[in-house]
Amino acid sequence: MSLLKDFSRGLVAENPVLRLMIGLCPTLAVSNTVINALGMSAATGFVLVCSNLVVALIRKIVPDEIRIPIFIIVISTFVTISDYVMQAYFQDLHHALGVFVPLIVVNCIILGRAEAFAYRNTVLSSTLDGVGMSLGFTLALGGIAVIRESLGAGAILGIKVLPQALAATIMILPPGAFITIGFLMAALNKLENKVL
Amino acid sequence: MELFGIFFSALLINNILLIRFIALCSFFGVSNKIDTSIGMSLAVIFVMTISSAVSWALFHFILAPLHLEFLRTATFILTIAALVQLEELYLKKMIPALYRAMGIYLPLITTNCAILAVAFLAIDYRFNFQQAMVYSIGVSLGYSLAIVLFAFIRERMALAPIPKWFEGYPIAFITAALMSLAFLGFTGMFGL
Amino acid sequence: MDKKEIVRLGLILAAFCVISAGALAFVYIFTQPQIELYARTSFENSLKEALPGAESYKETEKNVFEGSKGEELVGWVFLQSPQGYGGKIGMLVGVDTEGKVTGVKILSQKETPGLGVNILKESFLSQFKDKTADDPIEPKKDIEAITGATISSRAVSNGVRQSIRSANELIKRF
């Protein structure tokens, strides 16, 4: 039961992007197309799950005083691995995501989960927490990308959803990212107030 | 002319906050008051200039000759974290007035992705040292411009009637969208 | 904190650095050949798209690639970087020995998503095929510009026109 909770926490209740307001930069920057959003989520998820797993594994041998530098070393190792693998096998995606791949290292979600959860919990719950948080991130990022791409380009993954004349290019330009998140948060506020 | 282009591209056309979407956490986090946004801006200008100089030198004089480019991410983030600590100690001792103005923002800067992003971008764009310096000054001034303007708007917005569901962050995002739209107008300006 | 403790912490930190560097070196050695292979073949494929008739390409001058089939010279590929709306557009233009455009390939661009980015579309690029020095090659004349992206369209046209001019100079030398 508690394992299930470890997993589901990141999905909605503590959704990193929409609830905790962390990991905003990649959310806004790479949500212009669904494919970029999924690629970014995959890379971030890989780093998050691996670093949670490793941090939980080594938590007994890491002295308290130097835990943060060690977390950073662990995280940056996985970030570099995903950077190289992407560059070797998914060149177009790597080109589209650009500097945001190495910047995963400063994504607050990852260091935050290492410090707040993985350092204090077992390997199994930490891994589940990582998977849950990654899915929460994917959900938020993918959702925003679906809204932006369908309104801005009129098509998702090449499938037409809107007539070309109705597509508003602004939605896939930078301001569109701010507009989408602003309205999404307002909608969440309204929903929350209704429930309460 | 080329340096001029790099500078304005970094300052306005590719504004790091409004167009490139880097360091947004601080953009929304410390823009409640004009004072805090100015303090943060000072800290960013100071740290970004120094750390991009150090990381540029580190990459071109140590990592690249030794073919250790794959240690770039780890090296840069640890260097920046260490530099921020040193700068904090130095300011506290030597320039207390400046330390008081931006002291509490310095530790926050380690997690400010703009610093790391500029270090990476200066390498990716294959800038020489001079270009890298002009670029990082342009980026940090662009950061300051955007965040201080945003803080001015948010202070006035605190007094304005806002639809209930939009209070707080949602209206801040809409405001940022309008600012971003304005900055988008700079595209194509210098043919950059 | 006594000295012994500091040494111990330092050693642990160093051990983590070594493990991490080792893992990264492994991944680097593993992925590097693939990354380099991709960079090389993708450029070669682009040359081929610009000048399909040739089999081998040789850089004879800066940004000029001579394409030949066997012993015979087929044409040239020019690497151009005209100024677009969002930045420089990196493009390859192939011209045959009669001064006719054989193909245009965009390598890199920073044009506006949804508007200027449409210069990548085949329907736009194919208009340049078979153009010669006798054609104006200008948007709104013989080239249909992309809606809302006149500057981007003009930039590509400039790159093509420049290439034909360079090709004609090379042809004169023969």
Image (cartoon, rainbow, N blue to C red):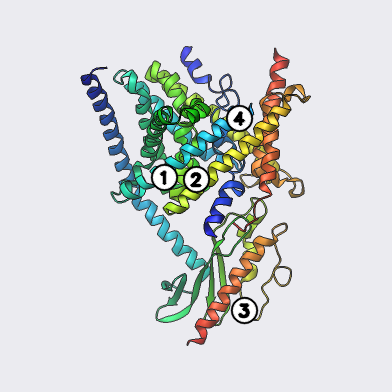
Q: Mark 1 packing: few (<14 Cα in 10 Å), some, or many (20+)?
A: some
The chain carrying label 3 is C
Marks 4 & 1, CB-CB < 8 Å contact? no
Q: CA distance from mark 4 to mark 1?
A: 27 Å
Which residue is located at x 22 percent, y 24 percent? C7
The x, y position of residue A5, in whole percent, is 50, 15
- The mark found on residue B136 in the picture is 2
Relative to B91, B160 lies left or right: right
Mark positioned earlier in the residue sequence (4 or 1): 4
The x, y position of residue C172, in whole percent, is 52, 86
Q: CA distance from mark 2 to mark 3?
A: 45 Å
The chain carrying label 4 is B
Q: CA distance from mark 1 to mark 3?
A: 49 Å
Q: CA distance from mark 1 to mark 2?
A: 9 Å
Q: Which residue is mark 1?
A: B53
**Which residue is farthest left?**
C4
Which residue is located at x 76 percent, y 45 percent? A166
Which of these two is toward me, C87 or A60? C87
Q: Which residue is mark 3?
A: C132
Circle 2 SS class = helix
The chain carrying label 2 is B
Q: Amino acid at mark 2?
A: Ser
Split into 4 quadrants, where in the image is the N terminus of chain C?
top left
Q: Which residue is mark 4?
A: B28
Mark positioned earlier in the residue sequence (2 or 4): 4
Which of discs 2 and 4 lies nearer the camera? The answer is 2
Marks 1 & 2, CB-CB < 8 Å contact? yes
Which of discs 1 and 3 lies nearer the camera? The answer is 1
Q: CA distance from mark 3 to mark 4?
A: 55 Å
Q: CA distance from mark 2 to mark 4?
A: 22 Å
Image: A41 above or below C51 = above
Q: Mark 4 packing: few (<14 Cα in 10 Å), some, or many (20+)?
A: some
